[in-house]
Each structure stands twice: as structure tokens, then as C-alpha cells.
Image: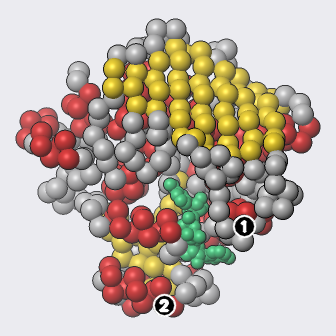
Amino acid sequence: MNSRRDFLQKLGLSALALQLAPLSGWAAGADNVEPHYDGPLLRVAILGLGGYGTMVAEAMQKCTKAKLVGVVSGTPSKVKAWQSKYGIPEKNCYNYENFDNIKNNPDIDAVYVITPNGLHHDFVIRTAAAGKHAICEKPMAVNAQEGQAMVDACKKANVKLLVGYRMHFEPKTLEVIRMRQSGEFGKIRFFQGQCGFTIGDPTQWRLNKKLAGGGSMMDIGIYAINGARYMTGEDPVWVTAQETKTDTVKFKEGVDETIQFQFGFPSGAVASCLSTYNMNNLDRFFLDGEKGFAEMQPSTGYGPIRGRTHLGELNQPITTHQTVQMDEMADIIFKNKQPVVPVNGEEAVKDLKLIDAIYLAVKTGKKVEVSL
Ligand code: NAD
């Protein structure tokens, strides 16, 4: 099966739509995969109208199955601006104090929490208590215990909890996963994930332990953690880690600057990863198997993702990650669709357990056994 067909089928297109899907449209991108969709629309309120919230709102303008219909914000001027830009009615606007009243609003299905990490837990718990589905940015929480409480609260309220793991819907990433699953790389032996950038403004919340939950590991290292799992197809059983800090003013106690970490997997495969807030040009995944390899660089940025394998360049389409993510999440919520790689709260708790283990390994200098 060629990879274009494979990808369209993963997105659930019928055989007829497959024949009709124009090649030119394909080359231009695959965001709007079902232009004549007439199923249920996922009506979303975004909570936290900052940099990434704005990116999601823009991307959602191209969604066919999800629609931005509401906002939750502590800043009235932002609410007004979003209302006029996206046509959001007054009755779908909330602040952090009156947010719980959203339970009485039948026109909103889900709340997408896009605040600093340390606030995710409380806002998701409130979303669940209001009987709305919760979509939450990564890292879902600042430790596994908080993350598990979020999973439990959503389960109890009978709502879904999904996490903004946009790479789980990215075509080149999915192609590497398909190749690994079909044995094209042979037995996987090694994964390398390098994720980082040089962080600017020392006063930003990303460098505040309470709001960020940590440092680079919470923000960018999590891509290497999550990637190590979806690229190898295994969950680690042990973790080792080492921290380097060159600037103790900018990176205070509990805010990591650079951490190198290693995973061991049940098959015997190993991973070697780096997370940093003090180096640029680090957005690279390398997967090595007995019969072949995949290299992706950039591997998790907003795109275009680029990559090659032992068979040649990856040429799957360039997508707007957040558009595809939100359309797919509509199917996950309404049709119980199972994505190739899960994006649920349980998946996020696994990453949080690994973050907890990495911090413990740094602190103790010891190998930490994990059971996900
Ligand atoms: P940001 O600073 O641009 O926006 C944060 C928003 O939260 C702002 O609107 C701010 O007003 C609001 N907020 C509410 N309470 C706050 C408080 N007490 N302190 C500070 N801000 C407060 O940050 P961002 O880059 O949009 O990141 C938000 C979340 O999105 C984070 O969890 C981050 O990890 C995640 N994120 C994910 C991706 C991705 O690719 N999936 C990319 C960027 C950010």
C-alpha cells in the first residue's frame, strides 16, 4: 500500500473519497480531509488566550469537525478582541471566576486548557465538574500524581480527557510508526531525541517553578520522552539522568536548564535524550533498527517536519498540526475513534511518571526502575 493511500485510510476516508481526493490538494496539504462533513461539530472554548491558544484558534478556522465557539480568560480586552475576530457570542465568554457556570451552557462541548502548566490540573478538574470534555496542553500536569487525579476526575464525570499531543497526528511521524510496526526497520535497538532552544526573558512563567512545574524537561524535553515511546513502540523500564546547570540565576532551584537522560526498554533497546533551555538547533529524532533507520529534523516543531529513512526522503504532506489534531479529537470524542498513538490522559500520565523518574534519577544519581 502506498503511503498516501495509507494515510488517507488512517484518517478514515471511504474508498470513493480516496479515489476522488485530488492529487493537487494532497500536495498542498491534508488539513481539510472531509470538506463535506455533516457529522457532529465539536464546539470548543479555549481557556488561556496566550501565544499557543492564539495558534490553536487560528488553526481551528480550517477545521471541518471542530469549531471555536467560546473563550475563558482573565483579561477582558482579549475576550473582546477574540469575540470580534472569531464571532464568539457574549453568552459563551467566561472569566476564571464565573467559569464554573459553563455547566449550564448547552452550546459548548469541550474546554481546551492552554494556560501555564501549573494551572492545568485545577482547570481540568473544574472542566470535568462542569460536565464538559477536557482537552489539555502538554505537560498535562506537573507530576504523575496530579495527572492521575485529572484522569480520575474526568472518568468520574464521564467526560473525555485528551492532551494536545499534536505529533500523534503528523503524517511523517505516522509513516515512521507504520514502518516500524510493519517491521521495515527490523528489531529496534536505539532512539535518540534531542529537544531544546535557548530561552529568553528570565521573568516568564516557563522559568517559574510554581507555574511551570520544572524547567526545560516540562516544556520541551517531554517531546523526547513521548517520542521515545511512540518511535520505539515500547514503554521504558528504567531511567538514568544527569543535569547540567550553567546559569543558577536564570534557572533557579527546581527549574532545570539541561538534562541528559537515558531509557531502557523491555526489548533491550535503549534511548539517549537531551532536554535543554540553553542550546539552539535541537529538534531531532533518530531511530535505529537492525534493518534500517529513520531520522527526523525538525522532528516536533510546528512544521514542516522533515525526515528520511534508509529507503529515502519522507514525503508525506505538510499539515497544520493543530487543525488535524482538533478534527481528529472530534472523532475521538464523538465516535470513540482510536488514534494510532493515544492522546488520552492515561498516555499523559505515563510521560509524567517518566518526568518524575528523570527528576528522581538526577537527584539521587541512581538508576530508577519504572513501571508504566
Ligand atoms: P503564554 O504565556 O503565551 O500564554 C499563557 C496564557 O495563560 C496567557 O493568556 C495568560 O494570560 C494565561 N494565564 C492565566 N493565568 C496565568 C498566570 N497565573 N500566569 C501566567 N499566565 C496566565 O504561554 P503558551 O506558550 O501559550 O503556553 C501555554 C500552554 O501551552 C503551556 O502548557 C505550554 O506547554 C503549552 N504549549 C504547547 C505547545 C504545543 O506545541 N503543543 C506549544 C506552546 C505551548
Compared to residue 97, the image places residue 20 above or below, namely: above
Side of 311 where 4 appears, left or right: left
Q: Where is ligand 1, by quadrant?
A: bottom right
Which residue position holds label 2? 77
Side of 329 where 132 appears, left or right: right
Q: Which mark is residue 202?
A: 1
Depth check, front residue: 270 or 90: 270
Depth check, front residue: 365 or 121: 365
Q: Which picture quadrant has residue 272? A: top right
Depth check, front residue: 230 or 245: 245
Quadrant where the C terminus sits is top right
- The number of numbered badges drawn on the structure is 2
Q: Secondary structure at mark 1?
A: loop
Side of 323 where 210 appears, left or right: right
User: Which residue is situated farthest in the right direction here?
Assistant: 364
Q: Amino acid at mark 2?
A: Ser
